[in-house]
Amino acid sequence: MVRDWSVYEKNQLIRYGLSDNDLTPYGEMPVEYITGHAQFDGLDFLVTKDVLIPRVESVQMLSEAERLIDGRMETVFAEIGTGSGAIGISLFQRLKRRGAKVNAVLSEISAEALGVAKKNLANLVGETDEVNLIESNLMETVKEPEWFDLIIANLPYIPSSRVPRLPESVVNYEPHVALDGGADGLTLVKKLLIQAKNRLNSGGALILEIDYSHDIADFVEIKGYQYEIVQDEFGQNRFLIAKLRH
């Protein structure tokens, strides 16, 4: 069956010097993997099949981060599970554009994904000592800085039973390790909440992308936080904000 390319997909192909005349072998592969590029928050990121394609819905996380930072001109933040680096690099750029002093750590367990993030950092930021990329299982080998004002993460959060039912363009091409969050979708999310409790400054917070099926009741067993659920533009639960209790 001939693929019906959307206007967006055709524009992406043209932008990177390709056409839809001879793309049958790609099947339902996302156009971002075909071109090797994805746009996020106005920036052009390199992507490979080692990383998730950044979603436009995740841009809301940047706005929530800025809301929590609340105009402070010095910020220390971490992104855990950075993948391509799209969220962490975009937040860094937003903060720098307003003249803030920023110290950022982006961690990733996959060496291949970390390689993609390093290329994006070099292309979009250049040489800098304000952003440190670290290979780490969550925060296990993130040693410095010791304390963070903000920790953000888009970890695997989809319950395992739903992963096979995702759209073909997702389940057949995107890395399952970045999608499958375990039986309830919260295996890594809860581990990070526990780890982060000892790494946040007073008044610090986490922003975690979650599944629409998750709610505050899923997290209250982990004490020490004040929890808030933020919905997306479609009224679906999308983000968990966990503020460290004083």
Image (cartoon, rainbow, N blue to C red):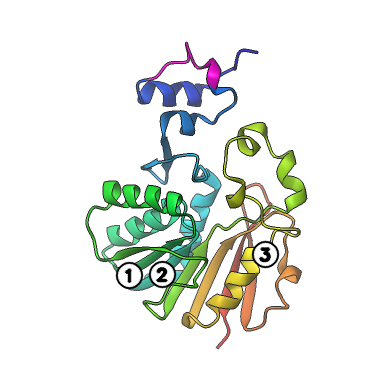
* Outermost residue toward the left in this view: 127
- Name the residue carrying label 3: 187
Segment tinted magenta in the rendering: 18-25
Q: Is residue 2 left or right of residue 112?
A: right
Q: Nearer the viewer, mark 1 or mark 3?
A: 3
Per the rendering, the mark at residue 103 is 1
**24 within the magenta span:** yes
Determine the residue positioned at 40% across, 81% down: 146
Q: Is residue 194 left or right of residue 31?
A: right
Horizontal and vertical percent position of residue 203? 49, 82
Q: Nearer the viewer, mark 2 or mark 3?
A: 3
- Name the residue carrying label 2: 77
Looking at marks 2 and 1 on the same chain, the residue that comes earlier in the sequence is marked by 2
Q: Please, what is the three-letter code of the amino acid marked with disc 1?
A: Asn
Q: Secondary structure at mark 3?
A: helix
Q: Is residue 244 above or below residue 85?
A: below
Q: Would you call the spot at circle 1 few (<14 residues within 10 Å), some (14-19), or many (20 or more)?
A: some
Q: Secondary structure at mark 2?
A: strand
Q: Is residue 152 above or below residue 202?
A: above
**Residue 179 vs residue 218, the one in the foreground:** 179
Looking at marks 2 and 3 on the same chain, the residue that comes earlier in the sequence is marked by 2
Residue 2 visible in this rendered orientation of the protein: yes
Q: Please, what is the three-letter code of the amino acid marked with disc 3?
A: Thr
**Residue 244 vs residue 32, the one in the foreground:** 32
Q: Is residue 110 above or below residue 189?
A: above
Q: Indicate the quadrant containing the N terminus: top left, top right, bottom left or bottom right.
A: top right
Q: Is residue 37 left or right of residue 25?
A: left
Determine the residue positioned at 38% across, 66% down: 105
Q: Please, what is the three-letter code of the amino acid marked with disc 2?
A: Phe
